[in-house]
Amino acid sequence: MSVTLTVGVLLFLSLAGFWLGRSRAVAVAGGRVATLHSVPVYYGSYVALWAGLPALVLVLAWLALRSPVMEWLVLDGLTPDQVEAWARVMLAPAELDTLLANIADEAQALTQTHRQLLLININNLAAGQPQYVNAAVIDALAPAAAHLNQLRTLADWTLFGFVVALAGGALAYTWSRISPELRARNNVERIVTWLLILCSVIAVFTTVGIVMSLLFESVRFFTKVPVTEFLFGLHWSPQTAIRADQVGSSGAFGAVPLFTGTLLIATIAMIVAAPVGLMSAIYLSEYAPKRVRSLVKPVLEILAGVPTVVYGFFAILTVAPFIRDVGAAMGIPISSQSALAAGVVMGVMIVPFVSSLADDVITAVPQSLRDGSLGLGATRSETIKQVVLPAALPGIVGAMLLAVSRAIGETMIVVMAAGLQANLTLNPLASVTTVTVQIKSILVGDQEFDSAKTLSVFALGLVLFLVTLALNVIALRIVQKYREKYD
Amino acid sequence: MDSMTLNKPEQAATTTQPVKVSARDVKVYYGAKRALHGVNVDIYQNEVLALIGPSGCGKSTFLRTINRMNDTIDICRVEGLITLDGHDIYDPRLDVVQLRARIGMVFQKPNPFPKSIYENIIYGPKLHGLATRKDEFDAIVETSLKRAGLWNEVKDRLHEPGTGLSGGQQQRLCIARAVAVSPEVILMDEPCSALDPIATAHIEELIDELRESFTIAIVTHNMQQAARVSQRTAFFHLGDLVEVGDTEEIFTNPRDERTQGYITGRYG
Amino acid sequence: MDSMTLNKPEQAATTTQPVKVSARDVKVYYGAKRALHGVNVDIYQNEVLALIGPSGCGKSTFLRTINRMNDTIDICRVEGLITLDGHDIYDPRLDVVQLRARIGMVFQKPNPFPKSIYENIIYGPKLHGLATRKDEFDAIVETSLKRAGLWNEVKDRLHEPGTGLSGGQQQRLCIARAVAVSPEVILMDEPCSALDPIATAHIEELIDELRESFTIAIVTHNMQQAARVSQRTAFFHLGDLVEVGDTEEIFTNPRDERTQGYITGRYG
Amino acid sequence: MTEIAEPMQTAAPVSFHTGEAATRRLKARYAAERRFRIYGILAILFACVMLFILLFTLLKEGTSAFFQTEVKLAITMDAGTIDPRGTGNPAQWDRGAFQDLVSDALYKEFPEVTARLERRDLRGLVSPVAGVWVGRLLDKDPSLVGQTIEMWLPASDGINQIVKGSIDRSLPESQRRIGDRQLGWFDALDERGDVRMAFNTTFFTSSDSNYPELAGLFGAAVGTLLTMLVTLAISLPIGVAAAVYLEEFAPKNRLTDLIEVNINNLAAVPSIVFGLLGLAVFLNFFGMPRSAPLVGGLVLGLLVLPTIIIASRAALKAVPPSIREAALGMGASRLQTVLHHVLPLAMPGIMTGTIIGMAHAVGETAPLLMIGMNAFVTSAPTSLLDSSSVLPVQIFIWADKPERGFVELTSAAILVLLTFLIMMNGAAIWLRKKFERRW
Amino acid sequence: AAARDQIRIVGSSTVFPFTSTVVERFGQTTKFAAPILESTGTGGGMKLFCSGVGADFPDATGASRAMKASEYDSCQKNGVEQITELVIGYDGIGFVQSKAGQSFDLTRAQLFAALAKEVEVNGQIVPNPHKTWKDVDASLPATPIEVLGPPPTSGTRDAWVELVMEPGCKEFPAIKALDKARHDAVCKTVREDGAYIEAGENDNVIVQRLVANPRAFGIFGYSYLEENQDKLHGLTIDGVAPSYETIASSQYPISRPLFVYFKNQHFGVIPGLKEFLAEYGSERAMGDEGYLADKGLVPLPADKRKASEASAQKLTPMARPAS
Ligand SMILES: Nc1ncnc2c1ncn2[C@@H]1O[C@H](COP(=O)(O)OP(=O)(O)OP(=O)(O)O)[C@@H](O)[C@H]1O
Ligand SMILES: Nc1ncnc2c1ncn2[C@@H]1O[C@H](COP(=O)(O)OP(=O)(O)OP(=O)(O)O)[C@@H](O)[C@H]1O
Ligand SMILES: [Mg+2]
Ligand SMILES: [Mg+2]
């Protein structure tokens, strides 16, 4: 009885519960459905949810625990002889000696390493792949493999039993409780509300997870590099030694140039994307014929899906040389990896974030408001600027925020187009680097993995997280202040 | 346009005023459905024309046709001729924006902007450059709100959102907003439907006062109101303009029996 | 709730019917602004109570308090006690949804769902399991629309959007929608404001008919209408319930001078 | 017309709105209107032109990848070479030697070439992995052993590039990998009609390879499909549910403000950090396998979650409150109100969020590098737990390959990814249109 | 830990193309499933490799530099006690330029003078004042110094410093005279004023940028140079031009060895691992005519290759590295 099948049975029970609950509700109402507290569907859902959810939680919990428990049992079940037979073949002489010395007390004799190695062999055997196991140990391990398979079957059947019992019991109980007075809707809605809460908390968990995965390493980083130097240092050059005999050249960890670089590029991107996106959205929702709108909107959305690597190429091979040529023609020297090129291309990428989302909220503004304004003799553009846009403001700001966020978080375009030089400048024609670029290139680079340089990645991530947090708090305040609720 | 010659407007020219708005054989369609079947009517300068008729007969539709608000409804199509001061308002060269500035409108469902009361009022004047300085705007806000009889109720909360007003207050706000731009013609779609008698009286006074300088068309379901404020009345029925004439005559001596039925219905 | 003992409702119990809805010292705040200052009123079973008063005096607010629609307005706060059949409706254990199913409401601004007319009507019955089969639904749609006097106008376009109707039609659609679920109490906020006399008569007949089995509270600006349809009338003024009593008495012999002023205002 | 012009055309009353100042003003306002509209058109044009340039470049570079130069050779399926131990069991074949069969066929074609170095050059005409094709044929029909079969085999990358013109054959010999001698042999083959340009089916049926002629997208495409399924299954329901809770149910207080800010902030977290999260949580903590579509899908799901939540919230906010009031007043519960009225009306916005979010996910590379989805996998995954690559990572990897053949393959892969994206969005766009209405 | 039937390999992106070729061949020609190979960077690969023994951990890692003592220790700590080191060949690093550019010969000392952060001018150590090649040496053309090279996070950069900058800096007496720490700092620091552009990421992009800008130079692996012979050429360094032969014979000064490390404890446990190592170390792969050579790997000299092959067969565990 595999887990998949168990889940299948569970699903079936749940569905059956729905049907049973529903029909019983109709039955107890004697056909006069209106006498029920809730509509029959709710009685069905009530039974289905109670039959399904607890048992599902059980299955999930079991899935998490299954492997460790069973492996522990299997290893525990090995006799010293079997272990010895295995060790004689598989272990180096030195290890073998220590193992044999302790063989009586198996728990001590087997190191974590041995356990892992044993497990691979046993697992492969149990999975029916003896060809992958050294022929000499097959005999010794065959019982363990059989044991494992036996345990698995047993465990799966137990689970199946439990699940059926739990689901069936819940089904029967809830089913028997069905009466016209039962507040099935309230019950179901409470469950659903809790599920909804759970969903919104997932976002919070994600944040917690991110902070956690950044925090510890960041703390380690800050023991090597002072926080103040990191936050306020004006020089970023993580050329620390890759090997001990090398010299970490300047090895400066001042993150300010990275943050200005990030902001510079994000700003350029928004200078492109905000007007282009917003004007496109306005044109599409207010001026363009329906057909044009239904064509252009999805076309623009393609822009959001072009792989960022492609944009990277586009920036460095098409846009950057173009900008440089224009600059050269005007006698301005422009770096071939200018922030401008990266920013513009990134702006193009996030255009649909603004255009599509804004288009939707603009379309949602009730017609009566437009009528009110047009009726006063406003032109269309005046209506849009003064009535429609303010009414759609929360959604538009949301779209803008999303676009900014995307710009700040984007990696590949800047990695390719903006370069790696941490210049502290606000000149869009110079080459700058961003936080994400440093994170990416340090993480997949060839450096040692616990040097200050690697750890700086986590600190960068953390600080970027805090910076955007601050930006978002401000944005929230603004939106709350200017929100215009229509209707 | 050949139907134009068919039926000469069936109204006696009781006023000596020039014709301000004139409709000839106006037909309006919503998709395939015809909402108006050839309406002919003139509205004279400085008069109040009341439009009455059962619900769904096309009063609002006609009103919206006059200042081309129907342009905003995709499926809506207008045939026939409507003129303002003798100029075809559906002339492609005509400027809709100016038209709508000249023909103001109060909608049937109050639709205040989700802005403050103050901003709701100065929206129009600002657009048309009627004022530039803060004190001018303040003055406009005050007079408009006073005219609509809303001033006392909202003078302390001018900067709160207009959408937080009661139904009747919203309606008066919309009237004040329309009046603030001083249009030449004002179209009012049941301006008093949500108003209590006192406020209604106030609006009726306003209408009387506005008539001095403007031309007004008003939709109402209240016969007494029609009788009180209007010089002439037009009766619509199922998309037809059944009858238009002096208010007194319509109410006392209607020519068409449908009018008669409606007027003398249980609720005179 | 000690205030309950303070002021006994100031109305003569002219009916022998039990009290259906009762309000004691109800105060409603919008943010800091107080919209109702302690309202005490009983609504008896099978009666029609008319709520009158100048615009912005709190009639809608009171109505919305009775079926807890004010819960949806963030800044709104209610104090005092309101009971339905003797049960506190602000009791946290109470199921608001059920409450609203029992106390239906027709809003001041018509708000049909952006769905077809048919779906607008069957929404409630479906929700409450009043019907299950297609023919049952068809029957409900037909009777409800007929009761609201809209059937003839829309019977050929039941599957067109309800938002494409004229103002008055939308209002009647909302009435039909509310009636379709046969609530115990129906709250109507100016149900006839956008209706012509004939449609109004229709609705008034409907109200009369509904009174047989339901309890009705109706906001109206039309004194005649209040006089025609209601047994008792409550007069609100600036957030105060000034007076409540038999309709006849209120209209002929009001006790409070504010009532007098309002009733005998220029528009009797 | 005449009749209407008639009615007492007295001097039209001078209104403020027809006065000279107003007309002048109006002119300015109209100019503003026109400008506004032109900005709109320009904006759209700008975006479209950018897209066009992108697509055009890709098409120009990518289409040639759909074709492959092939050479016809008569392969002798020498039993001794194929099955040196003579077991007759295909599992015991010396597959490494299949390439030798191809080389032998070449030697036979040009018997005059005998010197060791010359022969080396000669072998360079055909793909160094041409033996794979021989193997495939033999696997299909083991009875061919011992026979001589004429086969179309892919030319080597160098030859392929020269035929397609991306390397100029008029360059001096020292500047190209294919020498004059090799060109001579190739031309000889060509004259005999033993060279053709064929549709590159390999590109669609096989997985990653180090040899451009053997490299395909199938594995990555399947990987992308599986990953996107997980992503969608995670992010859409959770995202919409979270948005609904926050917008429709949650009390408006500090806590929900916090959650809101937190979600907005999540959108700004660099995607690569999500990779770190996936590494820490899914791989290290939950012990899920590396490089698996399941993990990739989970990480991308979390990545696009904020996008979907934010878009959905904006869409929910835009639904007018009167609709909610209407439903609540009918005795619908909040949940029913949301499900029956608010969500359908917000659906277009939610779909847009989903489209953009999924588009983001389908093109995302950086976080997948952290969880090992840049693996070199030569077979397509068959389950969510198999190792696999995805299209954008494949593109990323190919873009960095030294072999010239991968340049065109990269562009072609991008085209395929875009097709994938368009198909994915197509469904959502169709749904969105169904829900869209103005009220 | 589930049953595992595939080898997992991680490691340097420089080694990646070679390992992946072996992987592919291995999958095509043996009964074993093709190993799963990931490019994680040398450091990341080491981290994964050294995290432990068992089905959850990789079996081998590629490195563009030798394993460090600290990494070795971390391996030991996590139970990865025996490691086999396989040197697979050399990777030449070219200093290249567009064919259209004006070519000239360089010495490592000149390269140092052009690229170091501080250089010796007239016996003084000063921040690098050289703007054009002519400033470096009067015999060179007066074109500005513009070099696209790997970022400090890259192993190639590391190798460049070790193979070019350090030997180059020995030619300057004043630098030689400095104390050790300072000497190292001067010798190993690349200038950060824009003449040296950290390009990184994608070598094909560098190729394109070089073609577009004939005055710029690039630093990258020999395999890219070989593939793009029609567009680029490698400059002669210390009198030797980069070519397959000169790198193999160690005449060309800038080349470094590449490594693959295997976990001994996994041999016999992970199916096919031993066979994979044998394939990697075989003449068919690493030999002069091997398929890795076709991919741009410069084979080891015959004697070293013998040693490598032997260690691949004997699985001799490596000793703790000196540094
Ligand atoms: N959502 C709201 N926010 C703030 N104030 C409100 C809100 N709704 C109503 N008010 C205020 O509460 C008071 C009472 O409003 P209510 O809507 O109850 O009046 P009403 O008696 O129904 O008037 P009308 O006849 O004009 O509809 C008014 O002053 C109004 O401005
Ligand atoms: N947007 C629309 N789409 C389709 N039909 C419409 C639309 N607006 C109005 N109609 C129909 O046109 C007819 C006339 O509507 P109109 O709004 O002009 O009526 P009315 O006379 O104003 O009625 P009321 O007094 O109820 O407001 C009605 O049958 C109505 O259903
Ligand atoms: Mg109307
Ligand atoms: Mg009200």
Image: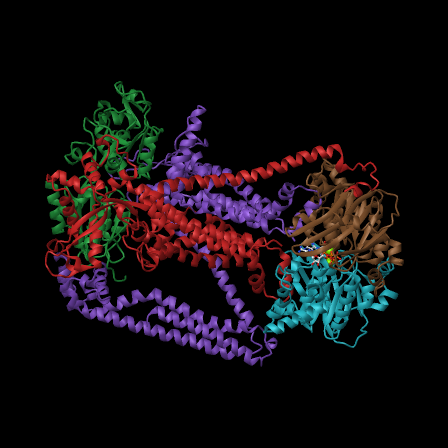
Chain colours: A purple, B brown, C cyan, D red, E green
Residue E290 image position (x, y, % from top left): 16, 44
Tell whether B208 sits left or right of A378. right
Residue A131 percent location from the top left of the image = 18, 63
Using residue D296 as the reference point, say whether residue B94 is left or right of it. Answer: right
Q: On the rendering, which quadrant does ligand 3 occupy?
A: bottom right
Between residue C105 and residue D169, name the one nearer to us: D169
Image quadrant holding the N terminus of chain D, namely top right
Can you say whether D60 is above or below A67 in the image?
A: above
Quadrant holding the C terminus of chain D:
bottom right
Corner quadrant of residue E17? top left
> Where residue A184 sits in the image (x, y, percent)?
54, 72
| Residue A311: % across, % down | 41, 41
Q: Is residue A221 visible?
A: no
Decide: is D72 above or below B250.
Answer: above
Count of labels in the image: 0
Q: Which of the 4 image quarters holds residue E93?
A: top left
Relative to A62, is E40 above or below?
A: above
Q: Relative to the observer, which residue lies in front, A485 or D228?
A: D228
The one of C236 and E175 positioned closer to us in this rendering = C236
In the picture, measured across the screen, residue B165 lies left or right of residue D436, that is right
Q: Is residue E46 left or right of residue A486?
A: left
Residue C232 seen in this snapshot: yes
